[in-house]
Image (tube, rainbow, N blue to C red):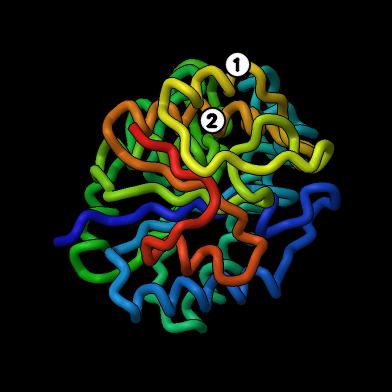
Amino acid sequence: MLKPIILKIGGSVVTDKSKPFSIRRKIIRRISEEVATAIKSGCPPLVIVHGGGSFGHPVAQRYGIHQGFREKAQLIGFVETVQAMRRLSDVIIENLQASGVSALPLQPSAITLQKGGRISTMFSGIIEKALAMGVTPVLWGDAVLDEEKGFSILSGDQIVSRLSALLSPSKIVFGTDVDGICPSDPKKTGAKPFGELTRDELERITMQSSGSNGVDVTGGMRGKLQEIIAITSVGIEVVVMNALKAGNVLRALLGGKVGTLVKP
């Protein structure tokens, strides 16, 4: 079997993070069609991971899920966060299936255990079997049980990092709401993205990065860059590009030049 590609679609792409529970249905439909076209065009097997955006983050923030279990009143918030993410993932998976993609939802809180906010156990056998069958696994940022904290937030970016170690993908594609990795916040300064970076160069940039816009309980852009550093440290290329622009997802999956390429 060909080495898979892991496609991460950020929560800021599929939702408007400034408005709770707002979903970008047209964007999701278009990305789904691009994924379907890529598969029909001979793209390697795919694993898709998406972020929480305005679905998971506001609920988790309200109940302090990211801070761990402190009182029983948080338990309803924990399960509400899980359910909110399932509602978002249902829309994404329905659009993928409508486009002809055999998308299989795999709820991370059902196959993952964390310890101190980092993955300690993830049952990856079902992901590997799905890929071997020609099915496209879809996972998402979630609230999960935690051996030390009771529960904690599992970001989509951390899932990608873990799957990189487990599956040895050919590359990782991060679809964000900016054109790539930039020297400063492009939404404030208009900065242009780097065409290519090495892992060492990215480490220096990460030290200077700030958080993302809107409520984000997973670490924002700094957290994303830290996961990318971990991914490239095991020899995997990473592409960071703007998934809000039509054609970029398709181009990235088929090996075209788009966004920022981070080399190991």
* Residues at marks 2 and 1, CA–CA distance in whole angstroms: 10 Å
Q: Is residue 187 left or right of residue 140?
A: right
Determine the image quadrant of residue 42.
Answer: bottom left
Disc ID at residue 225: 2
Residue displayed at 64% across by 36% down = 182
Residue displayed at 48% across by 17% down = 116
Q: How many marks?
A: 2
Task: Find the residue positioned furthest to the left.
Answer: 1
Disc ID at residue 7: none
**Badge 2: residue crowd in 10 Å (few <14, some 14–19, many ≥20):** many
Determine the image quadrant of residue 219.
Answer: top right
Earlier in the chain: of badge 2 and badge 1, it is 1
Q: Is residue 54 left or right of residue 39?
A: right
> What secondary structure is marked by label 1?
loop
Front-most of residues 47 and 189: 189
Residue 186, above or below 3: above
Residue 79 screen position, x and y as percent: 62, 43
**Residue tagged by mark 1?**
207
Q: Is residue 125 left or right of residue 149?
A: left
Residue 209, above or below 263: above
**Quadrant of image for the C terminus:** top left
Residue 142 screen position, x and y as percent: 55, 43
**Badge 1: residue crowd in 10 Å (few <14, some 14–19, many ≥20):** few
> What secondary structure is marked by label 2?
helix
Answer yes or no: is residue 171 visible: yes
**Quadrant of image for the N terminus:** bottom left
Residue 41 screen position, x and y as percent: 33, 78
The three-letter amino acid code for the residue at tag 1 is Met
The three-letter amino acid code for the residue at tag 2 is Leu
Residue 83 screen position, x and y as percent: 62, 52
Front-most of residues 143 and 262: 262
Front-most of residues 99 and 91: 99
